Amino acid sequence: MKFLARDQLPTLLADLSTAAEVWVPVKQQNGVVQFDRWAPDVDVELDVFLARQSPKENVFPQTETYLEYRYLMVCSAQRPEFTDQTREELRQLVESEGGEVVAEVPPVAQELLLVADVGGGSQGEPGLGSAAGMDDSAQIILGLRPCDARGLSQMDNVFGGYGGFYFDPYYNVRRNNTTIIAVTCRTPRSTCFCRALGGSPAGTEGVDVLMTEIEGGFAVEAVTPKGESLVERSVFEKAQPEVEESAVAAKQAAEAGVNVPFELDGVREGLKAGFDSPVWHDLAMRCISCGTCTYVCPSCYCFNINDEIVEGTGERFRCWDNCFNPMYTLETSGHNPRESKHARFRNRFSHKFWYYPDKYDSLLCSGCGRCIMYCPTHVDIREVLRTMSAETTAEKGEA
Amino acid sequence: MSGAEIARQDRIRELARQALTEGKVDYFIGWKAGHVPSEVIPAFVRNVDECDMLLWNPLCHHNLTTFLKRKMPDPPDARIGVCVKGCDSRTLVALLQETLVDKERLYVVGVPCDGIIDRRRLEKAFSDEVIDIAFQGEQVVVTTRGGETKELAYEELLLEQCASCDFPNPRYYDDLAGELLPQPEGPPRFPGLEEYEALSAEEKDRVLADAFATCIRCFACIHVCPVCYCWDQCVNRSRRPALVGQKVAAKENLMFQMVHMFHVAGRCPSCGACDRSCPVEIPLYLLHRKMNKELFEMLGFQAGLNVEDKPVFQTFNIDDALGEQ
């Protein structure tokens, strides 16, 4: 264990920022705390308990451009003379912008389609159209809570090819270049329920280094090899025995502040047994079917892929999506298997505690309580899970 | 809590009980305490014996008429009882003007309102979690999870819009919970816009761009809005036609909110539900209240005042002062 004096925090951040981009919780102008890039004039906000959103966006940006393209189309049957002209235009484009022709549809349908990948990216950012353009710079996130870190590690399975499923290069390149320095919670809220899910306000899942606030500074523990090398820095002092004692006490105090509002055992079974239960209608009554809970969630990962094209210049990007969105399940036929509000509502909880655990051997909730805090009508995930657990008990009682 | 407020609460419970007993409604929508006493949430009461959980106090900020709009009633043809404050009643009137809710299936309890607390502002005065807010006369007693207690003045904690409320009484109701309050005199007020209006066009652009750069496109603002009822057909999410960009970026976010603003213009009474629902606290009132001010100054129109009125964009008046603008 190491010790970092409170007044050495800026020194540490300055040191870290020489080799990586450093992200910390920062109070914005309107008082909302969000993760932001650290710079010498930026104050790190560790007093406000949770940032409004977890730093999920650092590994999984809300909008991420895959590629940019030019889409040139001519009607070769009616205007054959334009075919060659278009080819030439495209050739020049490829030359000047360093792109590559990725598809050429022969003029069978009396049309010639030429699609060029011109590297991707926008606003001066490097493109993601090809692996070479992928953002692989190192980043360090400091000041997130253990539930936020656990949220990231829960997402890892779906993007990491677990069980032979899809491996997402964009997510993983960023994830591997990210170092997580979490800070033990000091004053958990009534909405916290990490302990009900096997977590802790001093949990280390997904954490490289854990810092615990004590008198005069932080007790610092390395959790992973990445963390080990990080705490070698000279700004960290060797910890005196009382540092360890204070850290244990601080962790215990935090633990005591986290309620255990339901038993995890039985939740999955309850969701299965109660899939068609009319109880879902009652639970969903006050849901307004927006997506706030999913966008403040540290582990909701659903996304869609969009093509937007203006006058032949297009962009393909992914964007966070959520199960309350009509397009989420809308089929090309126009049929939507999840038409009603309660069916969309049911999916969020079933996904987190039933489908995802079944497929990826992990929960998809770390108990941060943001969905309860920021839901416009305070839909309470704890109440939903408690109610659904009782569904099995009810069924058993009948049998 | 004042005597008048206790009387309103008792009357809400009584009217709900009556409506359910008589079978007038399938369920009754009011307010109740959330997971901590400081949190008030919408309540859906189906049984007579649950009526005592209904409450009334200056934390009842939810505009419950949002649960009347398309796709919200469950079952779709439910007969619903609902509580409305002055501002909420105006969104209900707007829905009635467009015959989007059926009067016959509705039982409306009007609640005169002295003003709602700005919880967000209150919470920022504490670093710890606020778990209890009690009302003692003109004082508000706030307790945090750590046990800290502070007394604050009710008047100073009011939402900006409530501090200069033009309609403390509901504009539409079947029964009233409590006595009507004195109706304020004078022209309508549109508070909180002075600073914004004093800016140059470029500065306004910057203020809006900065505000909307933080938008996370969760769509809480449009879903919580009672007069925003396109549901799955919302143009902001449509890919065909792709009129609004799906990227989460300042320009696209502002575009999306502009669409919302123009679409609810003439039906939005600035109830502030969008503002209070925003998880990243974007000052949405800047757009909506400003729009309402323009509508009043140009056309003398205020949304949701009388069921017989037509929404402003559904009428044409030769005397409208458009030519002078």
Image (cartoon, grey):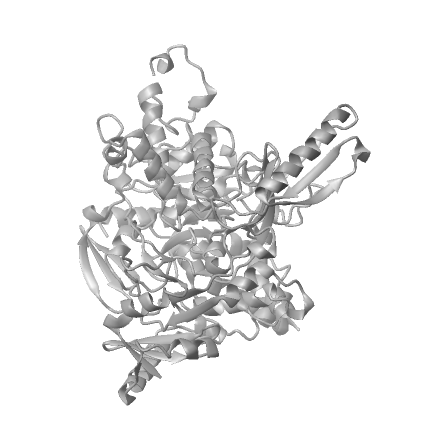
**Residue extending farthest top:** B318
Residue A309 position in % (x across, y down):
59, 37
Q: Position of residue B152 (x, y in %)?
A: 18, 54
In the picture, measured across the screen, residue A105 lies left or right of residue B88, that is: right
Q: Quadrant of residue A26?
A: bottom left
Where, quadrant-wise, is the C terminus of chain A in this rendering? bottom right
Q: How many numbered circles does the render carry?
A: 0
Query: Could you say where residue A160 lies in the image, as x and y percent from the top left?
Result: 60, 66
Residue at the bottom extreme? A241
User: Toward the viewer: A267 or A300?
Assistant: A300
Is the N terminus of chain A in the top left, top right, bottom left or bottom right quadrant? bottom left
Query: Does any portion of residue A305 appear in the rendered image?
Result: yes
Identify whether A100 is placed above or below A15: above
Residue at 26 percent across and 55 percent down: it is B124
Instruction: Give percent across and percent down for residue A292.
Output: 46, 52
A217 lies left or right of A64? left
Nearer to me, B211 or A133: A133
The one nearer the camera, A353 or A133, is A133
Position of A144 with respect to A238 (left or right) is right
Residue that appears at 46% across and 36% down:
B255
